[in-house]
Protein backbone atom coordinates (compact mmCIF):
# COMPACT_ATOMS: atom_id res chain seq x y z
CA UNK A 1 0.00 0.00 0.00
CA UNK A 2 1.30 3.44 -0.85
CA UNK A 3 1.32 6.44 1.44
CA UNK A 4 -2.02 8.29 1.39
CA UNK A 5 -1.25 11.87 0.35
CA UNK A 6 -4.93 12.75 0.10
CA UNK A 7 -4.94 12.78 -3.70
CA UNK A 8 -4.25 10.52 -6.68
CA UNK A 9 -3.35 11.16 -10.29
CA UNK A 10 -3.64 8.03 -12.41
CA UNK A 11 -4.24 7.01 -15.98
CA UNK A 12 -7.07 4.50 -16.28
CA UNK A 13 -4.63 1.87 -17.55
CA UNK A 14 -2.66 2.27 -14.29
CA UNK A 15 -5.66 1.08 -12.27
CA UNK A 16 -5.56 -2.71 -11.80
CA UNK A 17 -7.64 -4.68 -14.24
CA UNK A 18 -10.22 -7.21 -13.17
CA UNK A 19 -10.14 -9.48 -16.20
CA UNK A 20 -13.31 -10.61 -17.95
CA UNK A 21 -14.64 -13.97 -16.77
CA UNK A 22 -16.17 -14.69 -20.19
CA UNK A 23 -15.63 -13.21 -23.67
CA UNK A 24 -18.96 -11.37 -23.25
CA UNK A 25 -17.77 -9.55 -20.11
CA UNK A 26 -16.07 -6.15 -20.16
CA UNK A 27 -12.68 -5.32 -18.76
CA UNK A 28 -13.26 -3.64 -15.41
CA UNK A 29 -11.09 -1.02 -13.71
CA UNK A 30 -12.29 -0.59 -10.07
CA UNK A 31 -11.53 3.13 -9.66
CA UNK A 32 -13.35 3.56 -6.34
CA UNK A 33 -11.68 0.58 -4.70
CA UNK A 34 -8.18 1.24 -6.01
CA UNK A 35 -8.21 4.93 -5.05
CA UNK A 36 -9.92 4.27 -1.68
CA UNK A 37 -12.95 6.49 -2.34
CA UNK A 38 -15.85 6.17 0.07
CA UNK A 39 -18.42 8.82 -0.96
CA UNK A 40 -19.43 7.13 -4.23
CA UNK A 41 -18.75 4.12 -6.40
CA UNK A 42 -16.72 4.66 -9.56
CA UNK A 43 -15.64 2.18 -12.22
CA UNK A 44 -14.47 2.09 -15.82
CA UNK A 45 -15.74 -0.65 -18.14
CA UNK A 46 -14.07 -1.35 -21.49
CA UNK A 47 -15.26 -3.51 -24.39
CA UNK A 48 -12.61 -4.89 -26.72
CA UNK A 49 -15.32 -6.09 -29.15
CA UNK A 50 -18.82 -4.95 -30.13
CA UNK A 51 -21.67 -6.64 -28.26
CA UNK A 52 -19.99 -6.67 -24.85
CA UNK A 53 -22.37 -5.71 -22.04
CA UNK A 54 -20.73 -2.76 -20.28
CA UNK A 55 -23.65 -2.08 -17.93
CA UNK A 56 -25.54 -5.21 -16.99
CA UNK A 57 -29.34 -5.02 -16.95
CA UNK A 58 -30.32 -3.89 -13.44
CA UNK A 59 -31.94 -1.23 -11.30
CA UNK A 60 -30.79 0.21 -7.99
CA UNK A 61 -34.14 0.14 -6.17
CA UNK A 62 -32.63 -1.77 -3.24
CA UNK A 63 -29.54 0.40 -2.84
CA UNK A 64 -31.22 3.70 -3.71
CA UNK A 65 -28.22 4.68 -5.84
CA UNK A 66 -28.42 7.30 -8.55
CA UNK A 67 -26.00 6.45 -11.34
CA UNK A 68 -24.17 8.45 -13.98
CA UNK A 69 -22.50 6.90 -17.02
CA UNK A 70 -20.08 8.84 -19.21
CA UNK A 71 -19.19 7.33 -22.58
CA UNK A 72 -15.45 7.92 -22.72
CA UNK A 73 -14.91 6.33 -26.12
CA UNK A 74 -16.80 4.48 -28.82
CA UNK A 75 -20.54 3.99 -28.96
CA UNK A 76 -22.86 2.33 -26.44
CA UNK A 77 -26.53 1.41 -26.82
CA UNK A 78 -28.26 2.20 -23.54
CA UNK A 79 -31.71 0.81 -22.77
CA UNK A 80 -33.47 2.78 -20.02
CA UNK A 81 -36.85 1.37 -18.95
CA UNK A 82 -37.19 -0.20 -22.39
CA UNK A 83 -36.28 2.94 -24.38
CA UNK A 84 -33.11 2.71 -26.52
CA UNK A 85 -30.50 5.46 -26.86
CA UNK A 86 -27.38 5.54 -29.03
CA UNK A 87 -24.74 7.12 -26.80
CA UNK A 88 -21.58 8.20 -28.59
CA UNK A 89 -18.31 9.37 -27.08
CA UNK A 90 -18.92 12.37 -24.82
CA UNK A 91 -22.49 11.39 -23.90
CA UNK A 92 -23.70 11.51 -20.29
CA UNK A 93 -26.48 9.12 -19.19
CA UNK A 94 -28.11 9.23 -15.76
CA UNK A 95 -30.56 6.87 -14.10
CA UNK A 96 -32.61 7.20 -10.93
CA UNK A 97 -32.72 4.09 -8.69
CA UNK A 98 -36.00 2.65 -10.07
CA UNK A 99 -34.92 2.83 -13.74
CA UNK A 100 -33.92 -0.49 -15.32
CA UNK A 101 -30.76 0.18 -17.30
CA UNK A 102 -28.34 -1.67 -19.56
CA UNK A 103 -25.48 -0.59 -21.82
CA UNK A 104 -24.01 -2.65 -24.68
CA UNK A 105 -20.90 -1.69 -26.68
CA UNK A 106 -21.66 -1.09 -30.33
CA UNK A 107 -17.96 -0.78 -31.23
CA UNK A 108 -14.75 -2.35 -30.02
CA UNK A 109 -12.84 0.07 -27.79
CA UNK A 110 -16.01 1.50 -26.25
CA UNK A 111 -15.53 2.58 -22.65
CA UNK A 112 -17.91 3.81 -19.96
CA UNK A 113 -17.03 5.60 -16.72
CA UNK A 114 -19.73 4.83 -14.13
CA UNK A 115 -20.36 6.74 -10.90
CA UNK A 116 -23.06 5.96 -8.36
CA UNK A 117 -24.18 6.77 -4.84
CA UNK A 118 -27.31 6.98 -2.76
CA UNK A 119 -28.45 10.56 -2.07
CA UNK A 120 -26.82 11.77 1.10
CA UNK A 121 -27.81 15.39 1.39
CA UNK A 122 -25.08 16.60 -0.98
CA UNK A 123 -24.66 20.34 -0.93
CA UNK A 124 -22.59 22.08 -3.54
CA UNK A 125 -19.81 24.32 -2.29
CA UNK A 126 -20.35 26.54 -5.34
CA UNK A 127 -22.34 29.77 -5.12
CA UNK A 128 -25.93 28.91 -6.10
CA UNK A 129 -26.23 32.24 -7.97
CA UNK A 130 -23.93 30.80 -10.64
CA UNK A 131 -26.79 28.49 -11.63
CA UNK A 132 -29.66 31.00 -11.65
CA UNK A 133 -29.85 30.99 -15.48
CA UNK A 134 -28.81 27.36 -16.06
CA UNK A 135 -31.67 25.15 -17.23
CA UNK A 136 -32.32 21.79 -15.61
CA UNK A 137 -33.64 18.82 -17.54
Image (spheres, helix red, strand yellow):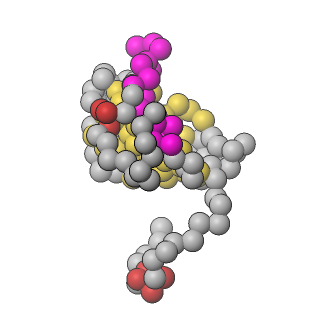
Q: Residue 42 placed where, x, y %?
A: 48, 43
Q: Is residue 72 left or right of residue 21?
A: left
Residue shown at the point (32%, 37%) measured from the top left: 12
Report if residue 136 lies within the magenta region. Answer: no
* Residue at the front extreme of this rendering: 3
In the image, residue 108 sits, relative to residue 116, either above or below, namely: above
Residue shown at the point (34%, 51%) measured from the top left: 91
Q: Residue 111 placed where, x, y %?
A: 34, 36
Q: Residue 34 placed where, x, y %?
A: 46, 36
Residue shown at the point (60%, 35%) measured from the top left: 58
Q: Nearer the viewer, residue 14 or 75?
A: 14
Q: Residue 15 placed where, x, y %?
A: 37, 33
Report which quarter residue 82 is drawn in: top right
In the image, residue 49 sits, relative to residue 116, either above or below, namely: above
Report if residue 21 lies within the magenta region. Answer: yes
Q: Which residues are magenta?
A: 17-36
Amino acid sequence: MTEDKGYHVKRVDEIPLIPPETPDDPEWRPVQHHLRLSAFGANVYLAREPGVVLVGRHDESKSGQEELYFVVSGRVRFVLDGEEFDAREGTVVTAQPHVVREGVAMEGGSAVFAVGAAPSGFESSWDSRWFDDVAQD
